[in-house]
Image: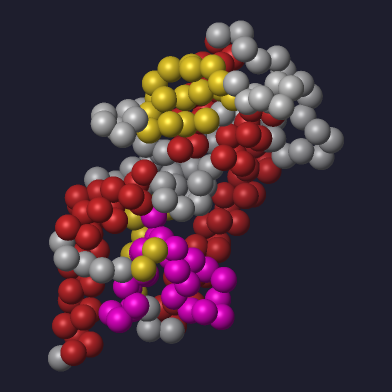
Amino acid sequence: MELKVLPDTRRIRAYLRWSDGGKSPARYLGQVDHETRAANLAEGWKMAWEMGLLTEEPPAEGSWAASPSVRAVMRGNKNKDTRPELRLRSLLHKQGLRYRVAARPLPELRRTADVLFPKPKVAVFVDGCYWHGCPEHLRESQKNAEFWRSKIEGNRARDAETDRLLGEAGWTVVRVWEHEDPADACARIEGIVRQTSRNATG
């Protein structure tokens, strides 16, 4: 599954691409317009199924995915530069804020913040509603429910540990849900960054 963004309109189109004798033809499926890449991929697979372009095969032995298409969507889910992150970063930049992207607040800790303000020591994480268990939008999977529940609970525990470790090291952690209004999130982050900067210099 391939997603292409039209440069003039910013519309997103989904294509099914496959290998055929060394060539890589593609079939246009339609336009998608969801907030996340994972959702757009899922919509693309759905359209391909409805158009009769796919056939179902049993998942590989030991696979955690209920079907090959589900596995493909999960593998294609980006862990950085998602649409909510790009929107938020654009607004922060317009406010004159400068930051690092996908950086570790603590070099020795393998936790990466989506937006990092090193001097005021503010780390921003943009959390996906599904993967991080949003209380408003999480809809538990009907297949492999126990596996996914355990996965999401593990992510929540990791998030809490990250917040604690960074807090102990003097960092301010800001978490933004992907469904939040980016303008509201930007205003909240800007206020924290500027206030923290004033406290550090005052």
> Which residues make up the magenta segment?
102-126
Q: Residue furthest right?
A: 61
Asked whether residue 170 appears in the rendered view, the answer is yes
- In front here: 6 or 119? 6
Residue 38 belongs to magenta span: no
Is 138 left, or right, of 119 in this rendering?
A: right
Give the image location of residue 192, x and y in percent.
22, 70
- In front here: 15 or 177? 15
Residue 103 belongs to magenta span: yes
Position of 115 relative to 19 (above/below) = below
* Residue at position x 32%, y 73% in the image: 117
| Quadrant for the N terminus in the image | top right
Q: Tell me the quarter of the picture where residue 181 sits.
A: top left
Q: Residue furthest front?
A: 22
Q: Residue furthest bottom?
A: 202
| Quadrant for the C terminus in the image | bottom left
Give the image location of residue 85, x and y in percent.
35, 51
Q: Tell me the quarter of the picture where residue 113 sits.
A: bottom left
* Residue at position x 39%, y 63% in the image: 101
Give the image location of residue 74, x and y in percent.
59, 39
Is 26 left, or right, of 150 in this rendering?
A: left
Position of 55 relative to 181 (above/below) = above
Is 145 left, or right, of 102 in this rendering?
A: right
Give the image location of residue 35, x and y in percent.
37, 36
* Residue at position x 59%, y 24% in the image: 17
